Image: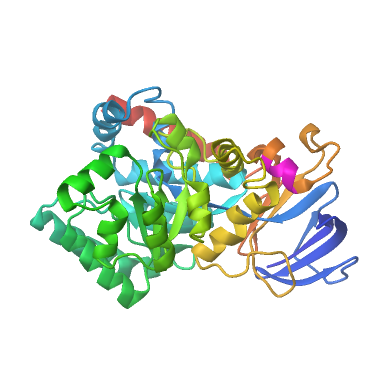
Amino acid sequence: MNILIKNVLLDGVVTDIFIENGTILEISPVCTRRADKIIDGRNKAALPSLVNGHTHAAMTLFRGFADDMPLKAWLEEKIWVLEAKLTADDVYWGGRLACLEMIKNGVTVFNDMYWHWEATARAVRDMKIRGFISAVFIDMFDNNKGREQIALNRELYALSKDYAPYVTFTFGPHAIYTVSRESLEWMRDFSAENDILIHMHLAETEYESVFSQTTYGLTPTAFLDSLEILSERYVGCHGCMLEKKDTEILGGRGAKLVHVPVSNLKLAVEKIFPHRLVQEARIPYCFGTDGCASNNHLDVLETMKFASLLAKFCSSDPTMLPARQTYLMATQTAADIFRLGKWSIEEGLSPDIILIDLMRPEFVPNFDLYSDMVYAANGSAVDTVICRGEVLMEGRVVPGEEEIMTRAGEAAHNLVKR
């Protein structure tokens, strides 16, 4: 499909953008090429789309169900009880709702860990966005369960080829306190052999740190390093409890991180992501929303604002995470982490593109677009979304959105009643 975006603001200049099968072929003041689809870009700005680095997509079904609770009670009395009842159909509609919400917020790529892997993969394919999808790998140190999980992940890896190019299989070991050494070592080897990303909760809570020290005599990071699991394929999420030695290890191994500020604040995990230590260790990191049970919203722009403000506040340095850098981390740095190539609107490149509606109060007087995006706007400013050369949303309308919201709502209420 060929798309021509006319008279759109790009890097402060009004221009035309011609896209063929997802690749930008021309950026010029006036493009005369014929296109299958013409988009009016007047009063809009073109930007690369956003990446959500850590989600549990189908937890949209739990939004607002278990708020304002201590973490242990939240998990044991509410979340795990419902998750035990989940069906593949529940996860499919919860996943489609998550994809819809992310599209509405300018997100075309997300990194997910949840149950019923194929249901999420189907949701991603049907919504035509990009999902890095892992099954939750938990064996609770049971050898039989570990073997079952290994067999399942082998099967899902083979099955993932059927969902290309929308879905990329990743490993999703939940955490060091739910996955055995033996299973982690298997994932390390299979990941290396097949070049698969490993998506894992890391240094999220004090409980995790105490467990690791008590069980292994090491911090979670040092324990994983002792297994040689940390590499350029490793993506650790949260990282609130990381100390200087941990960040030095991660940086030395080429590992990546995802900062999840809203969820961490809501669940009161006691410490804030150590921005300065992570930057000093030169660890690439992007941003994630987490699931809707612990965030309630899949708006990466909102997450970016929290991240930037927390970095400034905790470091007593108002220059930390400036707006342009923050936006680049949510786009280009995230694209690097997930191997998407150069995520920039330039001729010859293939980024996903969002158009921002500038005719909104929060963009007036519009001295700096990046400042407005990070500090003033939220996902509702996104008017149009183009992913892989397909228009997924235009004028804030996603085809079929009413059915998705209805079916997901029904699934959520039926789940609670079971």
Foreground: 95 or 405?
95
Residue 31 appears left or right of 326: right
**Residue 409: image location, x then y, percent:** 44, 31
- Residue located at (41% from left, 37% from top): 271
- Residue located at (48% from left, 52% from top): 277
Magenta stretch containing residue 301, yes or no? no
Vertical placement of residue 316 versus 9, above or below: above
- Residue located at (50% from left, 63% from top): 337
Which quarter shows the C terminus? top left
Magenta stretch containing residue 372, yes or no? yes
- Residue located at (82% from left, 52% from top): 40
Q: How is the image coloured?
A: rainbow
Res. 234 in view? yes
Q: How many badges with numbers are in the image?
A: 0
Foreground: 246 or 336?
246
Question: Which segment is the magenta one?
Answer: 370-374
Res. 395 in view? no
Residue 404 appears left or right of 3: left
In this view, the residue farthest toward the top is 68
Vertical placement of residue 222 versus 346, above or below: above
**Residue 240: image location, x then y, percent:** 41, 43
Which quarter shows the N terminus? bottom right
**Residue 57: image location, x then y, percent:** 43, 45
Q: Quadrant of residue 204?
A: top left
Residue 113 appears left or right of 356: left
